[in-house]
Amino acid sequence: MELENLAKIEAALGVTGLKSIQGDASTRQYFRCNQGIVMYDIGEGSAQRRAKFVDVSNRLRDAQFCAPKIQTHINELGLILMDDLGGKNLGQAPIDANFKLALDEMLRFDDVNHEGLVHYSSEIYSEELSRLGKFYLKPFDIEDDDILQIAAPYFEELSNAAARFVHVDYHAENLMLCEDGRLGIIDFQDARFGHPLYDLASFVDDIRVDVGEKRAEALTEFAFERLNFKDDDMWLHVLSAQRLLKIIGIFARLVGEGRMGYDQLIPRCFELLQKRLIHPELKEWREWFYDVVPQFDDIILTKLKGEQ
């Protein structure tokens, strides 16, 4: 962003010392200033996104979670000024005690009011899965959406299961280690209500931070016990597989748009996905995946970038 625009933001919000900080996969921009964190989000649908952000922040805070308090927001300028939860996330201090704290907080999501949030329906699961075909397979002229028919019965059962608040992107880089010892939760604007295992899948199959196989197993076992799930972990595999296939499609789109760094994350998605597809109940998913989806390599990357 140009310095002139930064000066306008400072003047509009009455803040000083704006400095850009790393954002997320969206087009939103974030700045740290002497008064907190500024989120800049403008363009089509941005007013609705900001309203959702404020709403979910209030829901989390009402349930005694540590989410950034909204200080002020100016819709016409696309600006939100919120509390700064610090610059250290779980990925920068990946020790067992911090992961246990994060899991404990996630298991309290039943306390968050989910009334009025979008339900994670079978249609949404399918639409998200379709992004694999739209963005990862399309450059290779592969038109095979059989996975949508294969997955449809699973998604129908997921959407009919008991539901609760779902963060959607509950992973290490969105969990801040605050100075007072609490866990701060950010990047929650896509929250829905849906299956209790969705956030666990996001947490233990973190794309950016390697949770570790033994730690992931221990966290999963503890979560299953607290959530009163039986030994059958099929739904965790299904939710993780759906999420990883979706993300491969999203990252492929971002690579095609010239966004930096996402090509380096795609191999991790494949690695995690292959482990989830081993589950015997996902035999059809696994066969489709290995028959249809090109394994990521330098040739695939070149194609996704549109360089040939």
Image (cartoon, helix red, strand yellow):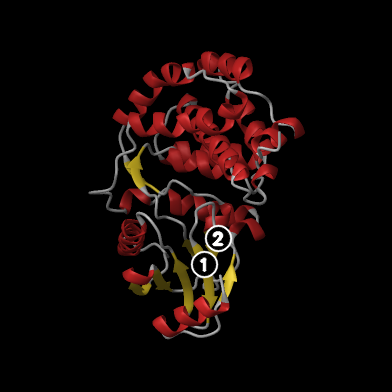
Does 233 appear above or below 304?
A: above
Location of residue 216 in the rendering, given as x and y in whole percent from the top left corner: 60, 40
Q: Are marks 1 and 2 in contact (CB under 8 Å)?
A: yes
The secondary structure type at the circle numbered 2 is: loop
> What residue is at 63 percent from the left and 27 percent from the top?
275
Question: In the rendered image, which residue does mark 1 sit on?
Answer: 30
- Say above or below: 103 vs 2: above
Q: Which mark is residue 263?
A: none
Question: Can residue 222 be seen here?
Answer: no
The residue positioned farthest toward the right in the image shown = 298
Amino acid on which disc 1 is placed: Tyr
Quarter occupied by the C terminus = top right
Three-letter residue code for mark 2: Gly
Residue 131 visible: yes
Q: Judge by depth and name the residue closer to the eye, 131 or 68.
A: 131
Seen from the viewer's position, the closer of residues 80 and 108 is: 80
Choose between 114 and 162: the one closer to the eye. 114
Q: Residue at x 62, y 25 (%)?
A: 140
Q: Residue furthest front?
A: 308
Task: Name the quadrant containing residue 272.
Answer: top right
Q: Is residue 182 above or below residue 141?
A: below
Q: Identify the residue at horizontal 54%, vertical 74% (top origin).
A: 32
User: Quarter holding the N terminus?
Assistant: bottom right
x and y percentages locating residue 218 in the rendered image: 58, 40
- Residue 163, compared with residue 79, is above or below; it is above
Q: Determine crowd level at label 2: few under 14, some 14-19, many 20+ residues with C-alpha closer than 10 A.
A: few
Picture coordinates of residue 271 (x, y %)? Answer: 67, 32
Measured as percent of width and height from the top left, residue 249 is found at 55, 35
What crowding class fits label 1: few (fewer than 14 Cα within 10 Å), some (14-19), or many (20 or more)?
many
Element under disc 1: strand
Q: CA distance from mark 1 to mark 2?
A: 6 Å
Q: Which mark is residue 23?
A: 2
